[in-house]
Amino acid sequence: MDARTLKQLLESVASGRATVDEAVSRLKRLPFEDLKYAHVDHHRPLRKGFPEVIFGQSKSPEHILGIMKAMVEQGDTVMVTRLSPEKAGVITAQYPHVTYHREARVLVHTSRPIKPAGKGLILVIAAGTSDIGVAEEAVVTATTMGHRVKTLYDVGVSGIHRLFDHDEIWDEASVFVVVAGMEGALPSVVGGLVDKPVIAVPTSVGYGASFGGVTALLAMLNSCASNVSVVNIDNGFGAGYIAALINRLSYSSEDESL
């Protein structure tokens, strides 16, 4: 339940369209619902502006469906990350109107249209085609949170001229998500060219000495560009979420100052 839904419920009680008992029935599952195997945080949209996100990688389809049912009954947007196609098939059999983003491995169920949450643009850049899965996880996360996203893929430092050929969209972006494996150099390049926040995402793409993304992670943590911050290896979700918060906060502050 988000702030808008709560306000509508209270207004319904005040106007007599809903009884106090009906309101209590709607609110009794706040702040969380105990499913024994999960405590579903129904209070999170009120606290943080976006519902709890389900990490699907290690959960059984039955547990995911149980958590989804509790969230759908509250009218929450449901996002399940790191979801295999096999598990997605089980879930779509129960919820045929969900959207499964195969490349991002993210499933989304919406009970109402997604409300725009920011005026700016989030630009997601991937160094190589092999990094696109992680980049798409960031894209789906940010768009599900209501933000406008554009992508720029396969523009890594081994052919840096490819990056410079698209500078027309750079000024439009309010925050950058830069995804790279191998040596992880691309976020430093982007950070040195823009005056906006750059969220660096190391991926586990690379040969043996990449150590499953550790080399890219350490390179990004040691970036000489002071506007670069770093999330964990392959954490496209975290990068997309943070980018959405930055975009939302920067424009709400701008609106308040007008």
Image (cartoon, rainbow, N blue to C red):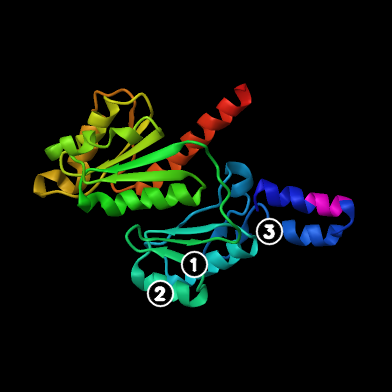
Q: Position of residue 186 (x, y in %)?
A: 22, 35
Q: Nearer the viewer, mark 2 or mark 3?
A: 2
Q: Is residue 12 magenta?
A: yes
- Number of residues whose C-alpha sits closer than 10 Å to that of mark 3, classed few (under 14), some (14–19) or many (20 or more): some
Where is 221 relative to 226, above or below?
A: below
Q: Going from the N terminus, do you reach mark 2 or mark 1 first?
A: 2
Specify the quadrant that holds the C terminus.
top right
Q: Position of residue 100 (x, y in %)?
A: 41, 65
SS for dot 1: loop
**What residue range appears in magenta?**
10-14
- Gap in Å between the C-alphas at discs 2 and 1? 11 Å
Q: Going from the N terminus, do you reach mark 3 or mark 1 first?
A: 3
Nearer the observer, 256 or 180: 256
Q: Give the residue drawn at x 53%, y 39%.
A: 118
The answer to whether any part of residue 76 appears in the image is yes
Q: Going from the N terminus, do you reach mark 2 or mark 3 first?
A: 3
SS for dot 2: helix
Does residue 86 appear left or right of residue 72 in this picture?
A: left
Q: Amino acid at mark 2?
A: Gly
Q: Main secondary structure of the magenta part?
A: helix
The residue at which mark 1 appears reads as 98
Where is 125 relative to 258, above or below?
A: below
The residue at which mark 2 appears reads as 89
- Number of residues whose C-alpha sits closer than 10 Å to that of mark 2, classed few (under 14), some (14–19) or many (20 or more): some
Q: Give the residue drawn at x 34%, y 42%.
A: 124
- Gap in Å between the C-alphas at discs 2 and 3? 29 Å
Q: Position of residue 73 (x, y in %)?
A: 64, 65
Q: Amino acid at mark 1?
A: Val
